[in-house]
Amino acid sequence: MPGISTARKLSVVGRIAGRVATRQAGQNRWLRAGWSALRVSFGHFGRVLHLLWLQIAGVFFLFFALVGALALRREYHAWHAGQIGPGKMILAACFALVFFWFGVTSFLRAKRKVN
C-alpha cells in the first residue's frame, strides 16, 4: 500500500482484528454469559445508586426547607414588630415551600421507582 501512512495501516488492521475478536467472543457461551451477567449487575447497581441519589437529594432539599422555615419565622417576628416590610417574609416563605416541594417529590420519585 504505497502512499498510506503506517498509522492508517495499523488503524485498518486494528479494526479488522477487533471485528474478528468480537465475532469470536460472540460464539463463546462463557463470554456471552459473563457479559450478560455484568450488564444485569451494573444495571441493578445503577438503579440502586439512582434511588440513593434521589433520597440524599430529598434530605438536602428538606434541610434547605427547614432553614427557609427558620428564616421565615425570624422575618415574621421582624415584620410583626414593624421593623421590615412583608417582602423578605414572603421570599422566605416561597423559598421554604419550593424546597419542601422538591424534597417531598424527590422521595415520592424514589418510592415510585421501587414499586
Image (tube, rainbow, N blue to C red):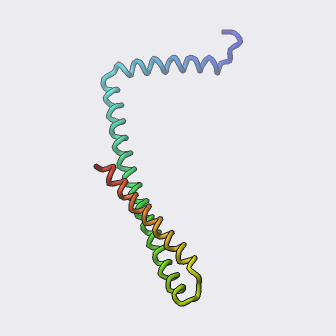
| Total numbered circles | 0
**What residue is shown at x 71% (from left), y 12% (from top)?**
3
Q: Quadrant of residue 84?
A: bottom right
The image shows residue 90, relative to residue 5, as above or below, that is below
Q: Name the residue nearer the viewer: 77 or 9.
A: 77
**Which sits in the foreground, 83 or 28?**
83
Q: Position of residue 97 (x, y in %)?
A: 46, 68
Outermost residue, bottom side = 81
Outermost residue on the right side: it is 3
Vertical placement of residue 1 versus 29, above or below: above
Q: Residue at x 33, y 31 (%)?
A: 36
The quarter of the picture where residue 5 lies is top right
Q: Nearer the viewer, residue 68 or 44?
A: 68
Foreground pick, 29 / 114:
114
Residue located 47% across and 81% down the image: 73
Going 36% across and 35% down the picture, which residue do you hit?
39
Instruction: Kindly indicate the quadrant of the structure image that contains residue 108.
Output: bottom left
Residue 71 position within the rendered picture, expressed as x and y whole percent measured from the top left: 50, 78
Q: Residue furthest left?
A: 115
Q: Residue furthest top?
A: 1
Provide residue 48's location: percent of width, then percent of height.
Answer: 35, 49
Residue 65 image offset from top left, x and y in percent: 45, 69
Quadrant where the N terminus sits is: top right
Compared to residue 51, the image places residue 5 above or below, namely: above
User: Vertical placement of 40 versus 51: above or below?
Assistant: above
